[in-house]
Amino acid sequence: MAYFLAWAAALQFHAWLNPGSLAPTLGASGAVAALMGAFLVRFPKTKIEVALVLGLRSLTNLALGKGIRFKAAAYWLLPLWLLMEIFSGALFGAHSGVAHWAHVGGFVFGLAALGLRYSGLEHKVNEAIEAKVTWTADREIVEATGLMEKGNLDEAIGTL
């Protein structure tokens, strides 16, 4: 559900900034950008591995395991990506065939996860989900397992 809300928000942001555009914007990249924004909020210090592709030769080298690779923390890499999208949207606008403003709108929508994090709502939702999906073992199975671990197989079978 959140993915589709993010998709709609990204599409709307793109429509606001390109009101006369007739180009179809059916891609999912705006929703993926929202996931990137939410990832930044939830896991800012996570290292993301980047493979730098500068052309066909570079792509071939990557396939052979010789390419340019590095790791960067999400708090550096994702805002840099956002700035590149803003720059591309401002420079090329609707003429590039890429909905850069949908990416920006999706990313900003994903950053709204920050509000969920600090409002306490996320914690309440997690508790409700955990209460419904938590596994509980029957008392007899727990008792039989304990007896088996002690080597009392006949007694363990008798409890079931």
Image (cartoon, helix red, strand yellow):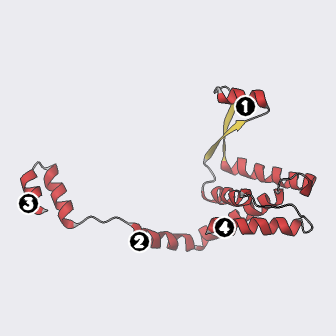
User: Residue at label 1?
Assistant: 59
Label 1, secondary structure: give it.
helix
Q: Is residue 5 visible?
A: yes
The Cα atoms of the two marked residues, 4 and 2, are separated by: 24 Å
Indicate which disc, 4 or 2, sits on the residue closer to the N terminus: 4
At label 4, the amino acid type is Phe
At label 2, the amino acid type is Lys
Label 4, secondary structure: give it.
helix
User: Residue at label 4?
Assistant: 4
Q: Position of residue 29 (x, y in %)?
A: 73, 56
Indicate which disc, 1 or 4, sits on the residue closer to the N terminus: 4
Q: Position of residue 99 (x, y in %)?
A: 82, 57
Q: Position of residue 11 (x, y in %)?
A: 78, 66
Is 1 drawn above or below residue 26 in the view shown? below
Name the residue located 79 percent from the left edge and 32 percent from the top edge: 55
User: Residue 132: which disc?
Assistant: 2
User: Residue 158: which disc?
Assistant: 3
Label 2 crowd bin: few (<14), some (14–19), many (20+), radius 10 Å: few
The Cα atoms of the two marked residues, 1 and 2, are separated by: 46 Å
The Cα atoms of the two marked residues, 1 and 4, are separated by: 33 Å
At label 1, the amino acid type is Leu
